[in-house]
Image (cartoon, coloured by chain):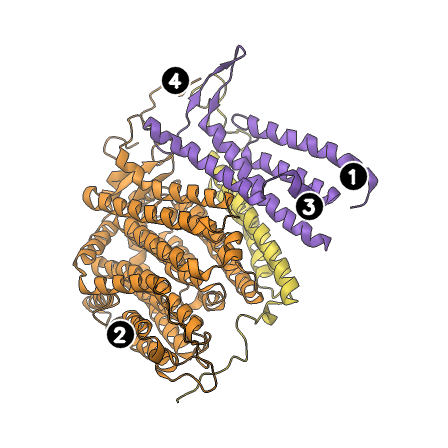
Amino acid sequence: MEPVFAVLTGIFLTIAVYLLLSKFIIRMLLGVAILGNAVNLLIFTSGRIMREVPPVIGAGLDVPAGPTANPLPQALILTAIVISFSFFAFLLVLSWRAYSSLATDNTDAMRVAEPVDAQLPPLGY
Amino acid sequence: MKSLIFRTAAPVIVGVMLLFSIFVLLRGHNEPGGGFIGGLIAVAALSIYGIAFGVETVRRAIVFHPLAISGAGLLLATLSGLLSMVFHVPFMSGLWVYPVILGEEIPLSSVMTFDIGVYLVVVGAVTSIALSLEERGED
Amino acid sequence: MAVSTSPIDLSAALVLEPVAALDWLVILPVAWCICIGAVLMMIRQRGGLQPLIAIAALCVLVALDAGLLWHVSQDGPATMVMGRWLPPFGIAFTVDLTGALFALTAAVVALIGAIAAIDDINTSGRRYGFYPFLMLLMAGVSGAFLTGDIFNLYVWFEVLLISSFGLLVLGSEREQIDGAVKYGFLNLVATTLFLITTGYLYGVFGTLNMADIARKAASLQDTAPLVTLTALYVLAFAMKAAAFPVNFWLPASYHTPRIVVSALFAGLLTKVGIYALIRVSVMLFPFAREQLSLVIAIVAALTMLTGALGALAQTDTRRLLGYLVISGIGAMLAGIAIGGAGGIGGAVFYALHSMLVMTALYLASGLAARLGGGFSLATAGGLYRDHLLFTTLSLMLFFSVSGLPPFSGFWPKVMLVKAALDNGAGWLAGALLFTGFLTMIATGRVFLLAYWRPAPEGRATPQEALPVKALLPLLVLTVLSVLIGLLPETLLGLVQNAALTLNEPSAYLKSVFPAGSMP
């Protein structure tokens, strides 16, 4: 199963990078969302895949009855999901603000902080 | 939103969802659920309330500023971890008490207070974002 | 139901003996910052009370970090595990000299920033939450310096990133939104790259505890793709630290927020990237670092030179300082590329110096703008005649950042140049010295135009003398820089010991895995 997931991760990452390279913030946002999912899939795959045995210790036992799926990647992914979710929410609000206050979503046109025609200092006095 | 059906149904839906969010929060120790997912359900409920009756109504209904709520949650979660200091066990160790209330043994733990803290953090932070987005949608 | 009733032996997985009180110092800086940040978040409307609480709390933080440094320098690295789970099963916080030194300096910088913010951040900025964000930023920074788990390091990176977003858009002017978009997206990509690499690392090692990785890396040297992992980490952390080909987000955003925020960012954020790079490349994968050292050295030289040349080309003093931050990052990368006690020690020392001095320079540029009309070199002038003390302090800082004696910038540069020459990398030593020369010209140009030159005709020079309160943060940082420059022995000894522990992490491993608890 792992090779299939590896290829899938690769496809996700390709799409994410393609979208992130766009000039328009809204596409970059979509890229960020897909990038987060690509990473989660990657972590999941690197924890090795195992079918249908949830890592739950049954009632009355101290150790699981047999081999189970690896629970650690799931914990890592959960953390990563929470973080990428909050990031996405923040960037969404920020992009909205940028769109309404800068009146553009084209990153090429965002030159307010780095004005093209900044005044040059005197060369001497 | 000016739909009469929605406005009539919203309070009921919101009430049920908030109750459900607390249920999900409390069952989270041994079963699927927990503070984060419970918090998100509560935020969904508050957002529905906001769509139906406007952001101002939600702000009045939750009394405190959303970020103050998440601050309280953060404090609660950290203090649950620091409680271990008193008992000479490492940070964030789970500490349990089993008080008997009305003949029923109720297990309570620092794990649970931590999870309630997480719930409050999520409710506060995500509500704050959702409300600010809804506010922009209104004008 | 309770854990203790279980019949199986728990001592292989859980801490059973009581924890020493001193070990709590490892976790307290982080927990303290989070608690105070949470309290401040709850009382956001009390604008008058916030600075008092924050400054008091940061004083406590400095004391905690100083205690931690003392503890670590006396007893060696210290470890605290989370939730009784022994490493490598649970998350461990492990502090060695490097982490403690960085944490203490960061706390000092934050304290100075909080004091300077009394003047710079107005009531609406306080209501918006400057101080809570500052405390949470410090939680993230301290967590990153103190943790001993690589995924946990990622989490702290995100904590400090989210708080830095909050600080960056404080005020919400158009400029800030513009800068924040670039800062946000690029830093997100960098941390995601960090996470991707950590995913690979977990796939290879099956563990995330740094001590465990360091232990296993030596035996996996021939079979595992360690150089690939390290190269990816170098790229991710170089992006966070703003090294040459991936540095353009820094001058695009660092000049947009309030000046105190810029100062804090310059002192704290990029240095966390450098710290993580040192931790990963030197302690975890020393073998791969040697393989990559030429690449890192070239990146370092280019970073230093583009930084210094960029600084020469700027009109806005804040953007000029942004390029100087980048140039300093290049010097630290040079130390990492050289390796050994001299190189790594030099990199650590340079980072500590840069944290103090870059913060001071940003604060100075803020004061200069207040006194002499804006941040643009085209309009500034006349500071020397009216404000002698301020001019003296600024000049000392300019010398310090250029690496002239007797200031704090001198000694790390000496260490780095010496280490480069000892390793036969004369060109790198040359680049270091040439960068120092260029930096001197760049700062000299600022001094000439903004301080020495008479105020332009027709501008009403504000004659208000600077209150001592406004000068105090600058004064403290300058005095620290001079003290480090004049009495470097203690710090030199500490950073050399720190570099030794990083190169030979047996003490670090012993702290995480005391003999007998090995699986």
For the question of whether residue C295 can be seen, the reply is no
Label number found at residue B7: 1
Among the chains pictured, the one given yellow colouring is: A
Please name which of the two marks, 2 or 4, marks the residue nearer to the observer.
2
Q: Amino acid at mark 2?
A: Leu
Residue C412, image x and y in percent?
24, 64
Q: Amino acid at mark 1?
A: Arg
Q: Where is residue C304 shown, x and y percent of the image?
A: 35, 71
Q: Position of residue C397 (x, y in %)?
A: 30, 70
Position of residue A107 in the picture relative to residue C13 (left or right): right
The quadrant where residue C473 appears: bottom left
Q: Chain drawn orange, letter?
A: C
Could you give the CA–CA distance between mark 2 and mark 1, rounded to whole angstroms? 72 Å
Q: Amino acid at mark 3?
A: Glu
What residue would you read off at disc 4? C6
Say which chain tag 1 marks: B
Q: Nearer the viewer, mark 3 or mark 1?
A: 3
Rendered image quadrant of residue A122: bottom left
For marks 3 and 1, the one nearer the N-term is: 1
Cβ–Cβ under 8 Å for marks 1 and 4: no
**Chain letter, colour purple:** B
Specify the farthest residue to the front. Answer: C464
Q: Is C428 left, or right, of B60 in this rendering?
A: left
- Look at the picture and state if B23 lies above or below C190: above
* Cα–Cα gap, marks 2 and 3: 61 Å
Q: Residue at x 55, y 37 (%)?
A: B120
Residue at x 34%, y 54% (from the top left corner): C106
Using the rendered image, report if marks 2 and 3 lie on a common chain: no
Q: Which mark is residue C433?
A: 2
Question: So how many labels did they put on this image?
Answer: 4
